Image: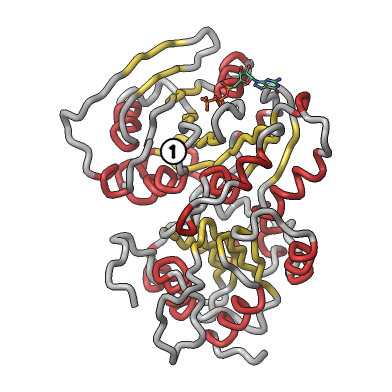
Amino acid sequence: MDEILPDLVALKNDVIKEINFDNTETYSKKVPITVITGFLGSGKTTLLNYILTEQHGKRIAVILNEFGESIGIEKAMSVAQDGELFEEWLELDNGCLCCSIKDNGVKAIENLMQKKGKFDYILLETTGLADPGPICSIFWLDEDLGSDIYLDGIITLVDAKHIQKYISEVKKDGIINEAVKQIAISDRIIINKIDLVTSSLDFIEEQIRNINSVAKIIRTEKSRVALNFILDIHAFDFKKPDLLSTLPDSNYKNDNYQHQNHNINEGVKTICLSKFPSLINLKRFEDWIQCLLWDKIIPISTNTIPSVSDNEIKILRLKGIFTPIQSPEFRVFVQGVEELYDLQYFPKYNDKDNDNNVKDKLVIIGTNLNYNKLRNSLWSWMEWNN
Ligand SMILES: Nc1nc2c(ncn2[C@@H]2O[C@H](COP(=O)(O)OP(=O)(O)OP(=O)(O)O)[C@@H](O)[C@H]2O)c(=O)[nH]1
């Protein structure tokens, strides 16, 4: 096993009893934050300007640019108090609060939170080359911030004219290129600049879908989208596991389909595991997830000592809902962004939003994933018969 594991450990099973399940109040007190990402020139600033001039009744604070550029999570967590900080505040007519901060993540948001009460929503625009993973992870890593804000969703803008070129670019040493990563990690994808495209938009959308089969996709010009498509989407909130409910029961056919169609980015794809023959053993599930996320392998069975092989995998996003064998009266909602994951537990009887109708399933987006391998791995790990 890899010796160096991230510090953050997900909630443990025995915490179940201590959780306050009615989190309606908790969410209403916290300020939502939406991360807007997208490759250079895709229309992020155009989208922000559009939002800031619309009458939406929200007081939105915007953090612009430079945020989290080339920082690792660790560095973000140890910001010096006297670190360089550049701020410019601008209050707009419609109540929005615009701020430009050149600093890394946590400090920028902490500073913003000192103005708490002046805004009820935060939009954070990353630079075009930023990897949104570490930025999103901050909200899980920093307990103080976590009590004030919650990550509502990750929005990715795509430049319809150039996206094929961007996602085809092969990087050295198997590094995933940023454009692909941004698509893989997102909850909503906006295909922008459709006025500049003469080739088939269906083909572009299909290529995006091959990378991320669960994000909702919309096509537009000048970044104009209905605001309820991107704001208050609760993508990380078990109360609204909307994407999960629309997923197919299995993507085995999809796998074949991708193969036949020469997916231009063979590396990153979405796998959906479902139709579990039995309830999930939570303890084993966590061990299994940790092999995927931290050891970067698809383990063969609990008896096999995992080792990093040539086929090292990388998980970019993970999402699932299942019933734990230890407490079948609960359901568990699992979320992962790169190496971090989080489990939320909620009792079945408390479901008011059709959660009981959402079938147990697990969606994994990453590189070098193979449906059969993943399925066999989970099945043997859980000691289920094939
Ligand atoms: N033709 C066309 N141009 C657009 C559209 N959307 C945005 N643009 C233009 O594209 C250029 C880049 O848009 P921005 O909003 O600055 O893109 P960005 O993602 O913020 O760019 P960076 O911050 O450099 O990464 C600007 O000149 C926009 O006016 C569109 O739908 N069609």
Q: Nearer the viewer, residue 9 or 116?
A: 9
Where residue 135 appears, as percent x and y from the top left, is 41, 43
Where residue 198 appears, as percent x and y from the top left, is 82, 30
Q: Nearer the viewer, residue 242 or 374?
A: 374
Residue 291 visible somewhere in the drawing: yes
Q: Nearer the viewer, residue 308 or 254?
A: 308
Ligand 1, by image quadrant, is top right
- In this figure, which residue is indicated by the disc labeled 1? 30
Q: Nearer the viewer, residue 297 or 50?
A: 297
Amino acid type, label 1: Lys
Q: Quadrant of residue 349?
A: bottom right
Circle 1 — which element?
Answer: loop
Q: Is residue 207 above or below residue 376?
A: above
Residue at image position (63%, 72%) is 370
- Image quadrant in which the C terminus is located: bottom right
Q: Quadrant of residue 197?
A: top right
Q: Using residue 248 as the reference point, say whether residue 181 is left or right of it.
A: left
Where residue 329 appears, as percent x and y from the top left, is 57, 73
